Amino acid sequence: MDDKNTALLEKMLDPEEKEAYFFADKLGKNADEETRDRLLELIQGNQWESAYLACRALAQSEFADLGLQATLEAVFDKRNKGVQGAFVQVLEHYNLEHSFVDVLKIYLFGNFKASQLAESYLNEVEFDITPRTIRKAEKHWKHYLHNPEDEGSTQIKRDFVEPMLQEMRDLFSE
């Protein structure tokens, strides 16, 4: 990693730094392969704040596809259950058009904040939908119905998901 990226990384990770987001974005725009590898290590580490900033940096980089994959893994990592919403929030910096099923899984199985953010993505992002995407989404929906984490929200989620899935099915039945 060159000196400039090393300095940006240090500023980004400095707990006293009030402009850490700025440095994360700048680091992402300058990221090389060494920087990418270091950011991926941070996402897999035990410091969620550093992992969040690394996710944000990768979203700005030419390695955004890898960053999205790593961010989604962080969302579903049990160690991050309490801060899951933060990782879902950073998804706004990524192109989610091919991530419908992942966003739906977050909506169904995430904590309250994560679920609410995922619902907004489901409403706002224009996803690339295929028959295979629908089948995968239906599989997760059925799994949720048989294993709801919160019985009280099942009807609310049913009212949101079932019309959405039907609308998608209708797109391919015409």
Image (cartoon, rainbow, N blue to C red):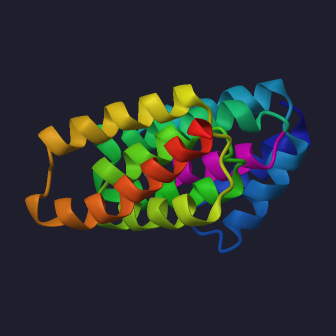
Q: Can residue 42 be seen in this snapshot?
A: no
Q: Which residue shows up at 54% across the image and 46% down it?
A: 170
Judged left or right of residue 116, residue 145 is: left
Q: Can residue 122 be seen in this snapshot?
A: yes
Task: Give yes or no for residue 50 being in the magenta stretch.
Answer: yes
Query: 28 or 108, which is in the foreground?
Result: 108
Task: Give yes or no for residue 51 being in the magenta stretch.
Answer: yes
Position of 36 relative to 47 (above/below): above
- For the record, the magenta segment spans 49-61
Query: 38 or 149, which is in the foreground?
Result: 149
Which quarter of the image is occupied by the N terminus? Answer: top right
Judged left or right of residue 161, residue 64 is: right
Residue reaching furthest to the left: 151
Query: 106 or 38, which is in the foreground?
Result: 106
Residue 161, x across and y down, in percent: 37, 55
Judged left or right of residue 158, residue 10 is: right
Q: Which residue shows up at 50% across the image and 42% down it?
A: 169
Judged by its main secondary structure, the magenta piece is helix
Residue 30, x across and y down, in percent: 90, 44
Q: Which residue shows up at 54% across the image and 25% down it?
A: 132
Which quarter of the image is occupied by the C terminus? Answer: top right
